[in-house]
Image (cartoon, rainbow, N blue to C red):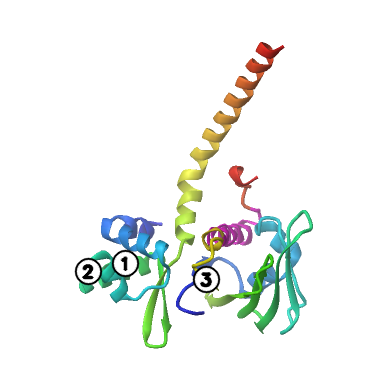
Amino acid sequence: MGKEGFLYQTIIATTPEKLWAALTTAEFTRQYWFGRSVESDWKPGSPVTITTPEGNIEVKGKVLAVEVNKRLSYSWGSGTSTDNTTVVFEITAMGPLCKLLITHDIDLGESTAQQAASGWTFIVSGLKTWLETGKPMPSIPWRK
Amino acid sequence: MDRIFSALASASRRKLLDALYKRNGQTLLQLCANLSMSRQAASKHLAILEKGDLVLTLWQGREKMHYLNPVPLQAIYERWIRKFEQKRLEAVALLKTALEEDKEKTDG
């Protein structure tokens, strides 16, 4: 990541295997990622798509690096923008817990940066709730 | 939770978080300059914020950059604020329904 960008860190009572599955399986991402399906075969160079519940492709990217249960990164292209940003997920096992660090090198000049940033906060919180309780976070009324 | 609240219980530390919200990824020197805070004070406050997991650091070459981690703040929202928000939203929804019914009656 360059000097600017966003970091999100949380500690989740789960295993690296479960956390990895939660990040890489569309059926699971729909539970905490605003209903979105994150899909790929997770091989370096393969496409990644993030699709809304209505079926619109919101993000298109490519798998950059894969270390199963440890580290995943993919490029992040949204809308018509050709300037891809990069998102990196790092999983560190800490006994019965897992630390998840997400970095996203969104250019601060972009007007959508703060919006995307607040989105990640909800995704991370939802992911933690879902893995720890097995239930999705209740929907946020003003986001309906 | 205790560490998050302790970290937030200082105006200087909240100022540091605001500065990082405005511009994420700053060195100690940049933060000191922008907030006219001494190096010692800023580094003491940043250490407490790091303990509370509200600030994360990454080395970029020889520079240690500080980043805001908003996830614990979201946890506070979930635990302490959301339940009140829910009641308020329900009240607003009821009020809206009641007012619209009134309007229908007047219009009819």
Q: Name the chain letter of the residue that bears numbered label 3.
A: A
The residues tagged by marks 2 and 1 sit, at their Cα atoms, a distance apart of 11 Å
Do marks 3 and 1 share a subunit?
no
Marks 2,1: beta carbons within 8 A: no
User: Which residue position is annotated with label 2?
Assistant: B41
* B1 in relation to A69, above or below: above
State the residue at coordinates (51%, 39%). Answer: B85
Camera-nearest residue between A138 and B56: B56
User: Which residue position is annotated with label 1?
Assistant: B48
State whether residue B103 appears in this view. Answer: yes
Residue B23: x %, y % from top left: 41, 66
Tell me the SS state at disc 1. helix
Marks 2,3: beta carbons within 8 A: no
Marks 3,1: beta carbons within 8 A: no
Q: Name the chain letter of the residue that bears numbered label 1.
A: B
The amino acid beneath tag 1 is: Ile
Return the mark for residue A105: none
User: Which residue position is annotated with label 3?
Assistant: A107
Instruction: Single out the mark in the foreground, 2 or 1.
Output: 2
State the residue at coordinates (61%, 80%). Answer: A71
Residue B52: x %, y % from top left: 38, 64
